[in-house]
């Protein structure tokens, strides 16, 4: 598929599935990925020529939690869109609801927020939705536990143990690395940005913790 895609990008030529006639594509391409393509090029998983053909104007989009000012605008837009699509009349999000939404981490980014607002609108009555409506739906969302709860559980489990400071620091560092890799879907460049360190430092830390 990489060879075919490269040909399409380079020559703007392709054949339909099952067809024999060569067609021309007069289009502009926008490609998106959550993979570390530079690393995949070095490992031979991704063609170098295709990478450079795609990487003409590269843009890095921060995760939604890094641009929380966008959450209210996106949520308001999705709310109006899904209310109209489902014949709900006028449904709006109150200030307390928007404040609560801004506090969530949204590891699934915009798509997760969109799905959440759709479910919230479909299961609610027309009118202004408040914090209690948002809390109700958040309680139904099993995978997303607040960081406060996680920290409290961790602290309780360690309360009966005496751990040297250095060992605890290493454990916290390893957890931070694992969490960043999971949130970045194993994309080293994005993980480094989430942690606020360089890629070189990230690779050294991964090797140090046996995560490379």
Image (spheres, grey):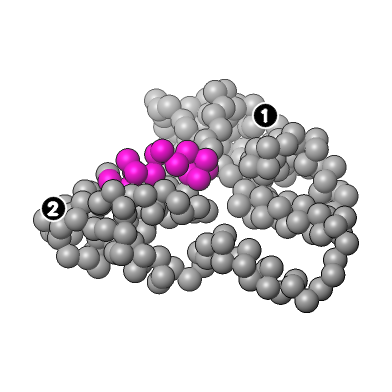
7 sits to left or right of 110: right
Q: Is residue 37 visible?
A: no
Q: To which residue does mark 2 refer?
A: 90
Give x and y (percent) for residue 181: 68, 51
Span highlighted in magenta in the image:
63-76
Query: What secondary structure is the stretch in magenta mostly built from?
Result: helix
Residue at 63% across / 63% down in the picture? 151
Please state, as top left, top right, bottom left or bottom right, where the N terminus lies in the image. Answer: top right
Query: Looking at the rendering, which quadrant does residue 115 occupy?
Result: bottom left
Question: Can you say whether 59 is above or below 174 in the image?
Answer: above
CA gap, disc 2 and disc 1: 51 Å
Give x and y (percent) for residue 34: 58, 44
113 sits to left or right of 36: left
Q: To which residue does mark 1 refer?
A: 49
Front-lying residue, 25 or 47: 47
Judged from this view, the residue extending furthest toward the bottom is: 160
Give x and y (percent) for residue 83: 19, 55
Front-lying residue, 145 or 180: 145
Q: Quick one: label 1, few (<14), some, or many (20+) residues within 10 Å?
A: few
Decide whether residue 64 is among the magenta residues. Answer: yes
Local SS, label 1: helix
Residue at 15% across / 57% down in the picture? 127
Labelled disc at residue 70: none
Q: Earlier in the sequence, mark 2 or mark 1?
A: 1
Give x and y (percent) for residue 197: 73, 36
Query: Looking at the rendering, which quadrant does residue 57 occupy?
Result: top right
């Amino acid at each position: 598929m990489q060879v075919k895609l490269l040909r399409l990008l380079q020559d703007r030529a392709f054949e339909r599935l099952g067809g024999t006639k060569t067609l021309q594509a007069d289009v502009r391409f926008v490609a998106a990925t959550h993979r570390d393509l530079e690393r995949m090029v070095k490992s031979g998983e991704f063609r170098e020529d295709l990478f450079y053909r795609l990487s003409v104007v590269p843009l890095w989009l921060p995760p939604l939690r890094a641009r929380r000012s966008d959450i209210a605008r996106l949520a308001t837009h999705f709310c109006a869109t899904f209310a109209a699509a489902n014949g709900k009349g006028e449904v709006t999000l109150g200030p307390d609801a928007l404040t609560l939404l801004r506090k969530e981490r949204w590891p699934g980014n915009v798509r997760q927020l969109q799905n959440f607002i759709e479910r919230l609108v479909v299961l609610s009555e027309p009118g202004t939705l408040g914090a209690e409506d948002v809390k109700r739906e958040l309680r139904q969302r099993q995978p997303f536990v607040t960081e406060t709860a996680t920290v409290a559980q961790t602290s309780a489990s360690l309360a009966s143990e005496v751990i040297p400071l250095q060992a605890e620091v290493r454990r916290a560092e390893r957890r931070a690395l694992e969490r960043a890799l999971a949130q970045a879907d194993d994309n080293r460049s994005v993980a480094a940005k989430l942690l606020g360190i360089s890629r070189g430092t990230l690779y050294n830390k991964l090797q140090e913790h046996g995560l490379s």
